Amino acid sequence: MPFCDLSHVRLYYSRAGTGPPVILLHQYFGTSESWLAIFDTLRRSFDVIAPDLRAHGRSSDPGGRLTLPGFTTDIAELVRRLGIESAHLVGASLGAMVATRLAVHGAIQPRSLVLIGPPNFAAPSTAAYTRQIIEEQFPTNEAEYAHLHRAHGPHHARDRLLANFIRDSEEQPPEMREWQAGVESLTCPVLLMSGDNDPVAPAPWLVDIASRLPAGELCLLPRAGHFPHRLLPHIAGLVLLDFLLRAERASS
């Protein structure tokens, strides 16, 4: 199993396929396994790399607050260690924020950027969805979360990840509220993807972002929720593959 020892953390990652690099960045509470349903579709045409973010899955936990800058710094160092200078960046929810910061700050040259369920923290529906995760979804699915993060012990998902999630929901650090700052400056192709009923990435907000991007596209999948690549992988995977292939042709 591939691991990479970085300055402050040891990251696990899955890697398969040949071709231009594609970096897949999962959501909070998730792991690289979140991409399994579309991984094979992409690796037939691309070199697909899916890391576990710090304190998630099989990656180590360096301690301290889990922050967007911390996640972003880790991935920036990982791609440097792997010798990757340019890649397609694909992120879901938290992963979308990380991918955007990597692209905007130039930590990696983006061949394209795909944002799945990018969160709008100003939307009341996002606050309601967050409460639902804390009060309903996590307790209902705690056994699954504990299994995903079992490398850290049986209580890591609750004592570490949920506790950090609750703190972020209460304090909303500015780097989270402003994660999309500068995205309009990106000239690479950008795909925004979400379910048409996603409470975290409301469709009107996505339409507004796409309209301000030099090369923006929008895909709203019917009743696909916050994670369309997981709920409708047979559709989302093909949409994603088509976008990446078109973006690659345009960059070559």
Image: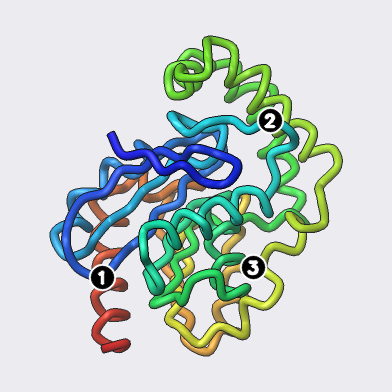
- Report the residue at 46% width, 54% height from top: 78
- Report the residue at 66% width, 39% height from top: 129
In depth, the one of 119 and 90 nearer the eye is 90
First in sequence, mark 2 or 3: give its number: 2
- Report the residue at 48% width, 13% height from top: 143
> Of circles 1 and 3, which is in front?
1
Q: Position of residue 4 (x, y in %)?
A: 41, 43
Q: Position of residue 106 (x, y in %)?
A: 57, 75
Residue 184 falls in image quadrant:
bottom right
| Residue 143 visible here | yes
First in sequence, mark 1 or 3: give its number: 1
| Residue 195 visible here | no
> Of circles 1 and 2, which is in front?
2
> Of circles 2 and 3, which is in front?
2
SS of the residue under disc 2: loop
Mark 2: give few (<14), some (14-19) or many (20+) Cα within 10 Å: few
Give the spatial CA distance, label 2 vs label 3.
35 Å
Give the spatial CA distance, label 1 vs label 2.
34 Å
Name the kind of residue labelled 3 in the image.
Trp
Disc on res. 205: 3
Residue that label 1 marks: 20
Q: Position of residue 189 (x, y in %)?
A: 43, 81
- Report the residue at 57% width, 46% height from top: 7
Q: Position of residue 183 (x, y in %)?
A: 62, 76
Mark 1: give few (<14), some (14-19) or many (20+) Cα within 10 Å: some
Name the kind of residue labelled 1 in the image.
Pro
